Image: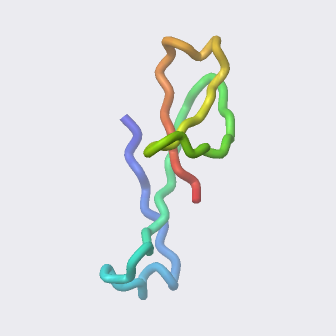
């Protein structure tokens, strides 16, 4: 299980919880076999990412970076 570690900067300490769209950043440490960075594409009412076919049946973790 990956437990996020909170990073706090001076601007994040002053952020008010009622600020819309403002989230504290988290740091994740993940061990794995391979990493890809891709953009999520619109697909109807959801988003979609295409991965290599040899990843089919494998476990993956998705982390939003922005």
Instruction: Identify the residue at image location x=44%, y=45%.
Output: 45
Instruction: Identify the residue at image location x=43%, y=73%.
Output: 21
* Residue 25 placement (x, y as % from top left): 49, 64
Instruction: Identify the residue at image location x=52%, y=77%.
Output: 9
* Residue at the outermost bottom position: 14
In this rendered view, identify the residue nearer to me: 8 or 16.
Answer: 16
Please determine whether, in this image, residue 36 is positioned above or below residue 55.
Answer: below
Instruction: Identify the residue at image location x=62%, y=29%.
Output: 50
* Residue 63 placement (x, y as % from top left): 51, 45
Would you say 38 lies left or right of 13 here? right
* Residue 58 placement (x, y as % from top left): 51, 16
Image quarter hosting the N terminus = top left
Q: Quadrant of residue 22?
A: bottom left
Image quarter hosting the C terminus = bottom right
Please determine whether, in this image, residue 6 is positioned above or below residue 57.
Answer: below
Please determine whether, in this image, residue 4 is positioned above or below residue 43.
Answer: below
Q: How is the image coloured?
A: rainbow
């Amino acid at each position: 299980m990956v437990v996020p570690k909170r990073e706090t900067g001076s601007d994040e300490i002053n952020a008010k919880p009622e600020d819309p769209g403002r989230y504290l950043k988290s740091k994740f440490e993940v061990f794995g076999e391979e990493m890809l960075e891709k953009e999520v594409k619109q697909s109807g009412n959801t988003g979609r990412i295409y991965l290599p076919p040899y990843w089919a049946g494998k476990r993956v973790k998705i982390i939003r970076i922005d």
